[in-house]
Amino acid sequence: MQGIFENSECTIFKAGDVLEGSRTTSLYDVLINPLCCEEMLIKKLRTFPYGSDEQKALKVKLTAATFSSVQQPNVRGEQYHIKHSGFIQFDIDGKDHKSMLEPGGVMKMKELVCKIPYTAYCGLSASGVSIWGLFKMENVNKHLEHFEAMFQSFKAIGIDLDRKPKNVASLRFIAYDPDAYINPNAKIFNLIYVEPVKEKKELKKNADGSNDNTESKVLLSRFNTECEFDLINDILLNAGWQYWKTKGEKICYTRPGKKSGNSGDYHTTKRTFTTFSSSAPGINWMKENDSGTWSASPVTLLLNYECGGNWAKVFEYIKTYL
């Protein structure tokens, strides 16, 4: 009996591809069918240290799905959203909870989350040391408000969620869990977050009377040095780039509008995205180099691809991420 999962659909992307090979299918089938994931790749991925470059390189090769959204054929992003699956995702990462990295820590967290009456699904992520799951929403037109209410509800019991799934087109690498918790009769999540009215703070001033933006500079610098590759990958995929291949410390991508080939790469150590194509979206705000290439920092990618050039959204995003 599928219960609250009945008639819910999502879109699957072969090996994380955002241009070719996507298909819409039953969300429930993706959760219970081991054939929907790359089992051998996942087993290999879990042999490497958590968060290692080897893990990151393998993850982008996995089959993935937009569990909150049915997307237009062969594209992915908020702008290609057709209809909502009715579910919002939660992601509890081992890097944010040291207790989960201890023996038995992941299972303890999973047991705790499965007791929540709204939990419709809960299982292991591709890494094996994080868990993810689904709540059924009451109002599909209130995705962001439901997500924020869920985020705050988890925070109240000491659990920090990853914020990436607040994007309706957020891509999740599929990892079938034979011991997953599935509750077809889970309670419908009806909580809505309402932004509190904030008091305006007086801006700090420098000796010459100009605004003191030291705090802002520190936040931007921290994001550039601390943001995870998974976030950068998600930003690029949301912007229409598609994974091409991994070459050492470089993760190579194909630009939107092109079916294959290396149009740009993200260097996981230098934390810089470089594109070689004048047809790539966004080169007008990237730094042009003498060698005929354009480059961007993580902050620049976040500002222009994810936040639409809005600095207020950037700082809001960074403050919740760090």
Image: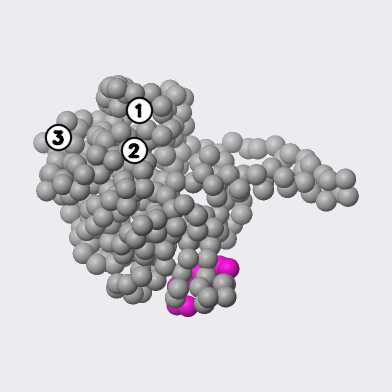
Q: For mark 1, what is the residue?
A: 101
**SS class of the residue under badge 3?**
loop
* Image x and y of residue 143, in percent: 40, 46
Q: What stretch of residues is rendered in magenta?
A: 278-287
Disc 2 to disc 3, C-alpha distance: 21 Å
Which one is in front, 99 or 211?
A: 99
Question: How would you classify the magenta stretch by its main secondary structure?
Answer: loop
Residue 66 visible in this rendered orientation of the protein: no
Pointer 3: what residue? Answer: 178
On screen, residue 114 above or below 33: above
At x 44% / y 24%, what residue is drawn? 158
Q: Mark 2 and 1 residues: CB-CB less than 8 Å, in contact?
A: yes
Task: Tell me where residue 244 appears, x and y as whole percent.
Answer: 31, 64
Q: Which quarter of the picture shows residue 4?
A: top left
Q: Is residue 121 above or below residue 218?
A: above
Q: Earlier in the sequence, mark 2 or mark 1?
A: 2
Mark in front: 1 vs 3:
1
Q: Which tag, 2 or 3, sits closer to the chain's start? A: 2
Tell me which amino acid carries mark 3: Pro
Whole-percent x, y for residue 181 in the image: 21, 30
Q: Which mark is residue 50?
A: 2
Query: Is 283 one of the magenta-colored residues?
Result: yes
Residue 268: say if magenta: no
Look at 28% across and 22% down and name the residue there: 104
Asked whether 15 or 274 is in front, the reply is 274
Alpha carbon distance from label 2 to label 1: 9 Å
Q: What amino acid does circle 2 point to?
A: Tyr
